[in-house]
């Protein structure tokens, strides 16, 4: 018990440190690309509106005028303005991708290091609980799917550790049951599901930062496209 407490204490440090690294990168990349892109765009707008009422009034714009000015800028340079919004959108996508990366990293580590101590006992407990409440043999895919949902619910209700619970729910949701022969006389659906779960849990993909780096790349490519297109439009 004490060993598991220490183990999850170390994992908590890994989670926090990883979360900070990803979100510092997110904030850093988003702020820099956003303000560089805004600078390029506003410099271009200032040049083409120089000497007009729009150009002379832009610096003194109030709240309403600023909103009107934003839509005016969007109408003049829709592609570049859209790319600036895309930079902001990628920040949210990066945040979601970071959460998924952390989950896969922690879940994969628990499965690799604590499968026999934590994952399998929790899974067997859920299977046993559901099995004790099933009155008859499962003979169709529909019944098996309902059984899988009951197992997921049992895991949520019985598994105390958040990360073990998330890993098991993820595994149950990913296993496929449509290749099971429900006409088989000696079919034990619980053995089938357990076997599939063991295979699925052991094959959880290694966490990858490719989606996070794709978002960062997308932000900087957006800045490059804004710069090049504005240079052409001068």
Image: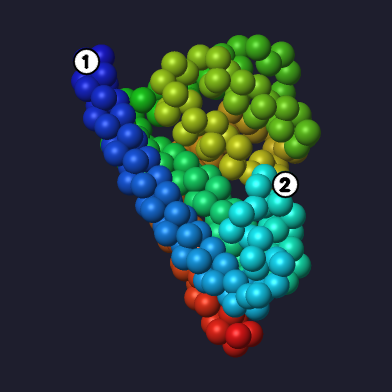
Residue shown at 55%/15% (left/top)? 157
Give the side of residue 213 with respect to residue 68, left or right.
left
Which image quarter holds the C terminus?
bottom right
Residue shown at 59%/58% (left/top)? 59
**Labels in figure, total:** 2
Q: Nearer the viewer, residue 222 or 133?
A: 222
Residue shown at 65%/75% (left/top)? 51
Question: To which residue does mark 2 refer?
Answer: 64
Question: To which residue does mark 1 refer?
Answer: 2
Give the side of residue 191 with respect to residue 111, left or right.
right
Quadrant location of residue 153?
Answer: top right
Quadrant location of residue 43?
Answer: bottom right
Give the side of residue 16 with respect to residue 33, left or right.
left
* Residue 54 image point, x, y percent: 70, 66
Colouring of the image: rainbow
- Tell me, yes or no, if residue 65 can be seen here: yes
Task: From this view, report whether residue 146 is shown above or below residue 113.
Answer: above
Helix, strand or loop status at disc 2? helix
Residue shown at 47%/65% (left/top)? 36
């Amino acid at each position: 018990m004490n060993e598991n407490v220490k183990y999850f204490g170390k994992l908590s440090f890994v989670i926090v440190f990883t979360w900070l690294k990803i979100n510092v990168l997110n904030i850093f990349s988003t702020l820099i690309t956003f303000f560089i892109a805004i600078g390029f765009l506003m410099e271009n707008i200032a040049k083409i509106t120089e000497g007009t009422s729009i150009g002379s009034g832009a610096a003194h714009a109030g709240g309403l005028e600023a909103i009107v000015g934003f839509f005016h800028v969007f109408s003049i340079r829709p592609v570049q303005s859209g790319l600036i919004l895309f930079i902001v959108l990628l920040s949210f996508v990066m945040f979601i991708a970071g959460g998924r990366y952390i989950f896969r990293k922690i879940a994969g580590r628990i499965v690799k290091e604590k499968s026999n101590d934590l994952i399998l006992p929790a899974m067997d407990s859920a299977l046993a609980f559901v099995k004790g409440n099933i009155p008859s043999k499962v003979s169709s895919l529909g019944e098996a799917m309902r059984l899988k949902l009951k197992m997921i619910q049992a895991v949520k209700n019985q598994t105390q550790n958040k990360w073990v619970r998330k890993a098991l729910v993820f595994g149950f949701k990913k296993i496929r049951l449509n290749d099971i022969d429900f006409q088989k006389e000696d079919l034990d659906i619980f053995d089938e599901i357990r076997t599939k779960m063991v295979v699925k849990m052991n094959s959880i993909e290694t966490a990858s930062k490719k989606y996070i780096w794709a978002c960062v790349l997308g932000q900087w490519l957006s800045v490059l496209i804004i710069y090049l297109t504005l240079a052409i439009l001068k």
